[in-house]
Image (cartoon, rainbow, N blue to C red):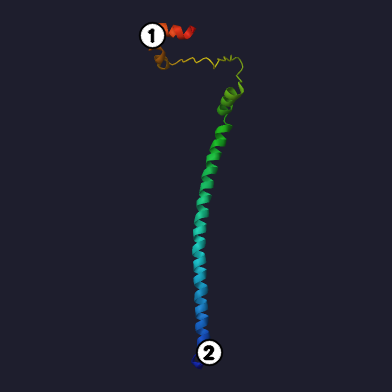
């Protein structure tokens, strides 16, 4: 106990305690900041996992025979054996919906004939 009576020893103990407190507080602050970084990385990981699940579902859908057949018919113009392909000219504006033709019927017949020939 005589050791603590000396002023130099007390000063060294106080300085050591202050250094220890400062070091521990810096460590606690550093861990607290890293916790925020971990939370951000977990959110990014969850987003990547959701994107991965979406892409796996899309991959399974694209690998199905129905999708492959649909794309072959629409984009490549292929058909099954025994089927006949009918091509329609898109430049003619043919409306097969009766609702779309109502605008034409509102015109008098003579105007419809006039626009057809002239």
Q: Which mark is residue 108?
A: 1
Return the residue found at the far bottom: 2
104 with respect to 70 (left or right) = left
* Residue 77 drawn at (x, y percent): 60, 21
Circle nearer the viewer, 2 or 1: 1
User: According to the image, label 2 marks what residue?
Assistant: 8
Mark 1: few/some/many CA within 10 Å (<14, 14-19, 20+): few
Q: Residue at x 52, y 58 (%)?
A: 37
Which of the 4 image quadrants contains residue 107?
top left
Disc nearer the start of the sequence (2/1): 2
Q: Position of residue 2 (x, y in %)?
A: 50, 93
Name the secondary structure under disc 2: helix
Q: Residue at x 55, y 27 (%)?
A: 66
Label 1: state its secondary structure.
loop
Residue 114 horizontal/vertical position (percent) = 45, 7
Of residues 95 and 56, which is closer to you in this image? 95
């Amino acid at each position: 106990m005589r050791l603590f009576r000396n002023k130099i020893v007390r000063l060294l103990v106080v300085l050591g305690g202050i250094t220890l407190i400062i070091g521990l507080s810096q460590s606690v602050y550093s861990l607290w900041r890293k916790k925020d970084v971990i939370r951000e990385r977990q959110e990014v990981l969850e987003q990547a996992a959701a994107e991965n699940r979406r892409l796996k579902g899309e991959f399974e859908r694209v690998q199905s025979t129905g999708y492959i057949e649909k794309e072959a018919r629409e984009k490549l113009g292929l058909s099954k054996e025994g089927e006949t392909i009918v091509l329609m000219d898109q430049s003619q504006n043919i409306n097969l919906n009766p609702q779309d033709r109502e605008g034409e019927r509102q015109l008098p017949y003579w105007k419809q004939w006039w626009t057809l020939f002239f």
